[in-house]
Image (cartoon, rainbow, N blue to C red):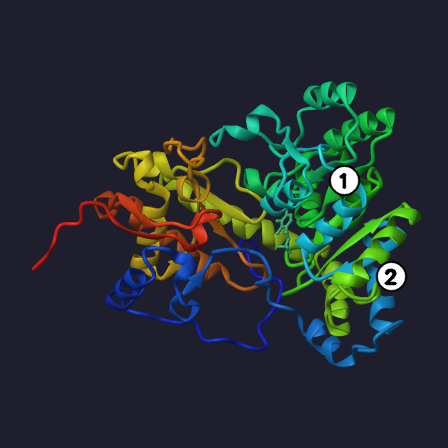
Amino acid sequence: MRTRIEPYRIKAVEPLPLTTRAEREGALDAAGWNLFRLPARLVTIDLLTDSGVVAMSARQWAALLEADESYAGADSFSRFEAAVREVTGFPEVIPAHQGRAAERLLFEALVRPGDVVPGNTHFDTTRANLERLGARPLDLPVPVALDPSADAPFKGDLALGDLEDLLDARRPPLVLMTLTSNSTGGQPVSLENMEAVHRLCSAHGVPLFIDAARFAENAWLARERDPRLAALSPAAVARAFFDLADGCVMSAKKDGLVNIGGFVALRDRAVAERIRAAMVVTEGFPTYGGLAGRDLDAMAIGLTEVLDPAYLADRIASVRSLADQLDQAGVPLMRPAGGHGVYLDSRAFAPHIDPLALPGQSIACELYLHAGVRTTEVGQLMRGRPQPGGTERPVALDLVRLAIPRRVYTCCHLDYVAEAVRDVFGAPERLHPLEIVEQPEALRHFGARLRPRAAVAVG
Ligand SMILES: *Cc1c(COP(=O)(O)O)cnc(C)c1O
């Protein structure tokens, strides 16, 4: 059969908010043309993020009731620990309430002020956690990662020559490989690159960790693009990556298929004991780590379900199908499609808007006004705030991210999204330059208020 069907049927439904254009105009105006400030009940299809917005399975919901909420030594913890060991092979398993908490626990145990911590490309919270400890995060992506139109298979890889130079010059406390590379568009890391990074780290005595937020999507994409891996199960491919590392941090809100949760897992018992001693003060006892027993059970099941080949085949095909529909309509995209979303190339999409007049945000706003679809700008608004006293310059890449939640939307929903993007692309006159009215000092995209530039008074 050629028709792609979701490999699940629907047992509980939630109505989609349906609104009129006039309602959306009022809402966007009240939100200061900032989609983070919109009430979610006025969003029809929400592609703001793929984090924590998964639909859990019937098995996960059933496990919530069976969970053991004992303070210490709960069965839920034993099941969780067994599942993480099975998937990763790491013996020491420490739960945390989400990915950034896991990062904080690991880095506080290993990183000192003045350290440099290299990786393929660190995620924003990873950078922030390192900077908070006085360390310097260092991104070493392969050059092709920075060219949105280059259709290379492994744009998540790390530049090996740069890492070797760094390791010859100094000894970082760890190297971190992010699978898939979220900040460069959900692009996969190849097993070959991971093996080479492992060899360099071993030769220099530096521990190698994985940021495993999307380890299963990475395994699937690696399996598709590397003939050596084609005959292996996704679980075996994922394990081949973990086998090369000393440990991992995980945001289970992505490939853990849960609404909240995370963990640190590693081989070094002494480091694990240091983390356990420290976490009691801030995260909770080491067998619950800031979570309820039911959250641990949901994660244990999610980690197994995410490696189901039928699930992964559908997940990757649905993202790719959205990208292909847009590509065929000539919409400029980041190539190839990433594991968890599709990224529009804003400057090529809206060349008539000056890069400093926020073309990406303008596209994101019109997608909402036209069809009630919420996306995120990852460009001038998010990354362009100048240093105090400086002037704003165009950022390297200006993108709009359509992040696809896991198991939430059907093929039909994504066809609707494709139509909305094509419509907006076909009517550039509806895209207006924007200006910032007020902006917070840090992470301005979350709180800024904007308005259409030189708006002509009507009426
Ligand atoms: C989301 C994410 C994190 C942080 O996890 P949270 O659960 O949001 O705290 C870390 N790394 C990557 C690659 C992520 O995508």
Q: Amino acid at mark 2?
A: Ala
Real-space CA distance between mark 1 and mark 2, rounded to the nearest whole angstrom: 28 Å
Which of the marked residues, 1 or 2, is nearer the chain's N terminus? 2
Left or right: where does residue 111 sit relative to residue 10? right
> Image height check: is 5 above or below 346?
below
Q: Nearer the viewer, mark 1 or mark 2?
A: 1
Q: How many marks?
A: 2
Left or right: where does residue 20 sit relative to residue 121? left
Q: Which residue in the structure is indicated by mark 2?
A: 82
Residue 213, position as x, y percentages in the image:
67, 50
Q: Amino acid at mark 1?
A: Val
Residue 335 visible in rendering = yes
Residue 450, position as x, y percentages in the image:
31, 51
The quarter of the displayed image where residue 302 is located: bottom right
- The secondary element bearing badge 2 is classed as helix
Residue under the image location 85 percent in, 25 percent down: 204
> Image height check: is 361 above or below 67?
above
Q: Which residue in the structure is indicated by mark 1?
A: 111
Q: Is mark 2 within 8 Å of ligand 1?
A: no
Query: Is 41 or 34 nearer to us in this picture?
Result: 34
The quarter of the displayed image where residue 223 is located: top right
- The secondary element bearing badge 1 is classed as loop
Residue 429 badge? none
Residue under the image location 84 percent in, 78 percent down: 70
Rendered-image quadrant of the N terminus: bottom right
Classed neighbour count for the residue bearing mark 1: other residues with Cα under 10 Å, few (<14), some (14–19), many (≥20)? some
